[in-house]
Image (cartoon, rainbow, N blue to C red):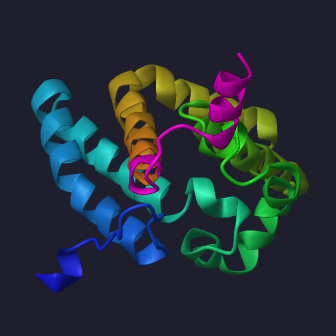
Amino acid sequence: ADRLRIHLPQGTMALGRDHDRATALATVPVALVIALTLGPWPGVGAVLGCLIGGYWLSPDLDTHCRALKRWGPLRLIWAPYRWLIPHRSLWSHGPLLGTTTRLLLLGGWLALATAALPTVSPIDLWSTLEAWGRSNPTLLIAGLLGIEVSCWLHLILDGDPLPAEWHRRRRRR
């Protein structure tokens, strides 16, 4: 039971293990809500999205975090993200925008990797992914929703769901 508890002293951000536990626990309600509203396969897609988002596509990829370490030697693909994006900025921790930034960077690396392979072209890969998305829109949306849920969960656990820049902009007005 203690392994399932998330310990957060008031006014502090969650540790990596707390984010991991919360991600694991969040998969149950995410699965139930999506499965009951969109069907069982989208429920599975949302759970996978939530796990991938929480364990490998964390907003904290710009720091030395558990998610970055899980990439092993491939963690180098996140170097531009770490160098160019300040921690807790709109581009890393912003709802929708942070998730989109990470997915676009990952997609860019995937396109570069396929361009280096003589058997697969980035255009063919994009065409295949686009065709799959068109034939499985509910599953695609559920998976992306799961990734975004994990991002929101991360922000809430950090104690403030808004990126630091939003507070600075609000104070200037």
Figure check: 93 above or below 75 = above
Figure check: 122 above or below 28 = above
Q: Is residue 120 left or right of residue 47?
A: right
The residue nearer to you, when weighing 7 against 48, is: 7
Q: Magenta-highlighted stretch: main secondary structure?
A: helix
**Horizontal and vertical percent for residue 164?**
65, 42
User: Where the C terminus falls, by quadrant?
Assistant: top right
**Horizontal and vertical percent for residue 50?**
38, 51
* Residue 148, image quadrant: top left
Which residue lies at the image location 22% right of the left edge and 41% below the top edge? 43
**Horizontal and vertical percent for residue 151?**
47, 46
Q: Is residue 84 left or right of residue 159?
A: right
- Residue 25 inside the magenta-drawn segment: no
Which residue lies at the image location 19% right of the left edge and 26% below the top edge? 38
Which residue lies at the image location 30% right of the left edge and 50% below the top edge? 47
User: Where the N terminus falls, by quadrant?
Assistant: bottom left
Q: Is residue 38 left or right of residue 121?
A: left
Q: Which residues are magenta?
A: 155-173
Which residue lies at the image location 63% right of the left edge and 33% below the top edge? 167
The residue nearer to you, when weighing 156 against 58, is: 156
* Residue 25, image quadrant: bottom left
